[in-house]
Amino acid sequence: MRVLLTLGGAIYMLNLAYRIARADMTDAFTETITKAPSVFSGVLAQVSNPKAWIVSIAAVSIYVNSSDYYNFTLILFCVVFFFACSLSLLGWSAIGATARKNFGNLRRFNVIMAILLTTSIALMLKDILSEFKHFFEYT
């Protein structure tokens, strides 16, 4: 089952890489936003983000112990997580703003991103193929 899911994910990711590489970037920065996103839309996007829920649940289950100091540990974890995520968001925002200003050729950027995605797919498939190799050596 894991192999089928990996292959299905690889096919989907290859499709994404192709679409990224072929994306039309002529109107990428000419579109104007008539109304800024609201705080509610940002909160809704985060609350409905399954990756954020999985990371939060996994992190709390790993780092927050169930001792007598559970509440203190949970609050401390939330504060540390908040600052770590805020710094990460600030860093990615700065990188994005710099890239938007300084990256003249968006087409080249998309092709580079597609190549990196395809490389990660190749590494993922390499691991699956090595598992098959070991499976057939033992049978």
Image (tube, rainbow, N blue to C red):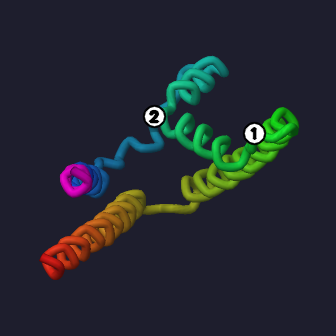
Q: Which residues are magenta?
A: 1-8
Q: Nearer the viewer, residue 46 or 129?
A: 129
Circle 2 crowding by C-alpha within 10 Å: few under 14, some 14–19, many from 20: few
State the mark number for residue 131: none
Q: Is residue 22 visible?
A: no
Above or below 64: residue 117: below
The image shows residue 3 at horizontal and vertical percentages of 21, 57
Circle 1 crowding by C-alpha within 10 Å: few under 14, some 14–19, many from 20: few
75 in magenta: no
Count of marks overlaid on the render: 2
Above or below 128: residue 79: above
The image shows residue 93 at horizontal and vertical percentages of 64, 49
Q: In the image, which is nearer the foreground, mark 1 or mark 2?
A: 1
In the picture provided, is 3 more to the left or to the right than 88? left
Q: Is residue 68 visible?
A: yes
In the picture provided, is 37 more to the left or to the right than 131? right
- Disc nearer the start of the sequence (1/2): 2
Residue at x 63% of width, y 17% of height: 40
Q: Main secondary structure of the magenta part?
A: helix
User: Mark 1 — residue?
Assistant: 66
Tag 2: residue type? Glu
State the mark number for residue 31: 2
2 in magenta: yes
What secondary structure is found at the residue carrying circle 1? Answer: loop
Q: Quadrant of residue 121?
A: bottom left
Tag 1: residue type? Ser
Q: Nearer the viewer, residue 65 or 104?
A: 65
In the picture provided, is 47 more to the left or to the right than 112? right
